[in-house]
Image: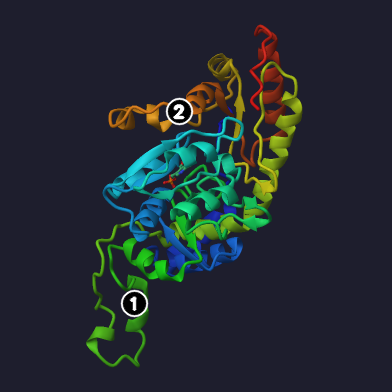
């Protein structure tokens, strides 16, 4: 079976892990600190705080920005559930916003319509790694005094107007995912980047139970013979916040450091595969290929086509040994959120029935790509000729 997603892990990661096992330190420690430093350099952001998922990154961003009960947070309807659960964890209400049916990113027009006097923040998602319209989002956010938290779970290595996602002046924090099938996979992991120094201490404490000093920092103190009093000595710490067990560990960070070195070339390979698909599917049935905004560079986390034959294509490809996926059923249609409030979002409700995610990852072999393309072309010959209504 050709998978939809697959992490590219190899001997280098195994070698690095062997070395870390020999050090005897696998918790939050020096490898995590090194990964934070390198990731901050990579994005150009001033600060990076490593956590155990993008879900944690989104939750802590909401908390650190003071989002709480009664507040409303705007989120696009087509995304993974974490984008909406993060404000919900804080007692806030995720308000679902329709998407632009072409790019699948948040609709600026609908975002404006959904703002009330309770709105505190917006969480744009860079769907598939294709950057959302950040300048327009920031303009609306500024006008209404909203925080901007970027959900960059798909966007490791993406760029907006030449600047790396993670270092945009348009947002307060940016949340990355290093989950098993993301562009920079470590198993599970995440990162918050920010240029706002006042958030850093709080985020560091919130990710580690509200404790003011990490075990690694205290262990280093034990070896520091210049220490004068017990409160400076290794065992002493204070709990300053109602924090969470959300920190990254050095096993994940060790894999992350290797993956970070490979990220640029891995993303280039993703882009090359995406271009092959673009060319191959031109004029095939009603297929519409992904569309990027101007002045953006995508990390190409996924390749999502639109077709009226979504379900048939999914089944026929499965028969041929090719797995596909659907990203995503709109969140306002999911029972948990539907029970809370009935919302109508015409674009999201129409477009999601046409979405199909094709296999895309650096290790996808040329023969496999050829097989996927020829299979899709063959399948469309059996479908009646129709064209999807061209979306503006
Ligand atoms: C858009 C989006 N946001 C957030 C997340 C959550 O990431 P994590 O699994 O690291 O918590 C995901 C994961 O798939 C995602 O796709």
Q: Residues within 10 Å of mark 1 (few under 14, many from 20)?
A: some
**Residue for badge 1:** 219
Question: Horizontal placement of 149 versus 366: left or right?
Answer: left
Q: Residue at coordinates 34% horizontally, 71% vertically from top-left?
A: 214
Name the foreground residue: 39 vs 83. Answer: 83
- In this picture, is 296 found above or below 32? above
User: Residue 195, how many percent across, how many down?
Assistant: 51, 66
Q: Residues within 10 Å of mark 2 (few under 14, many from 20)?
A: some
CA–CA distance between discs 1 and 2? 53 Å
1 vs 2, front mark: 2
Give the total of numbered labels: 2
Quadrant field for ligand 1: top left
Residue 222 in sight here:
yes
Q: Residue at coordinates 68% horizontally, 56% vertically from top-left?
A: 162
Q: Are marks 1 and 2 in contact (CB under 8 Å)?
A: no
Q: Residue at coordinates 27% horizontally, 47% vertically from top-left?
A: 70
Name the foreground residue: 316 vs 99. Answer: 99
- In this picture, is 279 found above or below 233? above
User: Residue 122, how many percent across, how many down?
Assistant: 44, 48
Q: Secondary structure at mark 2?
A: loop
Q: Residue at coordinates 59% horizontally, 24% vertically from top-left?
A: 322
Q: Secondary structure at mark 1?
A: helix
Image quadrant occupied by the C terminus: top right
**Residue for badge 2:** 345
């Amino acid at each position: 079976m050709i998978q939809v997603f697959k992490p590219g892990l190899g001997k280098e990661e195994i070698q690095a892990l062997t070395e870390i096992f020999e050090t005897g330190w696998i918790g939050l420690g020096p490898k995590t600190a090194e990964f934070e430093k390198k990731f901050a350099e990579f994005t150009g952001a001033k600060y990076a705080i490593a956590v155990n998922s993008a879900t944690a990154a989104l939750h802590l961003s909401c908390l650190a920005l003071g989002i709480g009960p009664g507040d409303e947070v705007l989120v696009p309807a087509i995304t993974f559930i974490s984008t909406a659960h993060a404000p919900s964890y804080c007692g806030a209400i995720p308000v679902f916003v329709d998407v632009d049916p072409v790019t699948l990113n948040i609709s600026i027009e609908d975002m404006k319509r959904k703002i009330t006097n309770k709105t505190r923040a917006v969480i744009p998602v860079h769907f598939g790694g294709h950057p959302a319209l950040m300048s327009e989002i920031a303009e609306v956010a500024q006008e209404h005094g909203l925080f901007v938290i970027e959900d960059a779970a798909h966007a490791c290595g993406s760029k907006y107007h030449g600047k790396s996602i993670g270092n945009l002046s348009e947002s307060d924090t940016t949340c990355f995912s290093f989950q098993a099938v993301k562009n920079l996979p470590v198993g599970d992991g995440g990162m918050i980047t920010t240029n706002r120094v006042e958030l850093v201490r709080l985020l560091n404490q919130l990710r580690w139970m509200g404790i003011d000093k990490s075990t690694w920092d205290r262990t280093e103190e034990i070896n520091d013979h210049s220490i004068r009093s017990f409160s400076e000595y290794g065992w002493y710490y204070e709990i300053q916040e109602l924090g969470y067990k959300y920190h990254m560990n050095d096993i994940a960070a060790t894999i992350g450091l290797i993956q970070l070195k490979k990220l640029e070339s891995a993303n280039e390979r993703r882009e090359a595969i995406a271009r092959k698909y673009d060319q191959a599917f031109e004029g095939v049935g009603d297929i519409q290929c992904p569309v990027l905004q101007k002045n953006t560079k995508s990390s190409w986390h996924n390749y999502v086509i639109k077709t009226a034959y979504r379900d048939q294509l999914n089944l026929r490809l499965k028969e041929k040994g090719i797995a596909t996926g659907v990203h995503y059923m709109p969140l306002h249609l999911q029972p948990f959120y539907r029970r809370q409030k009935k919302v109508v979002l015409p674009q999201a409700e129409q477009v999601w029935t046409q979405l199909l995610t094709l296999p895309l990852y650096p290790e996808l072999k040329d023969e496999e790509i050829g097989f996927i393309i020829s299979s899709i072309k063959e399948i469309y010959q059996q479908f009646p000729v129709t064209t999807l209504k061209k979306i503006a």
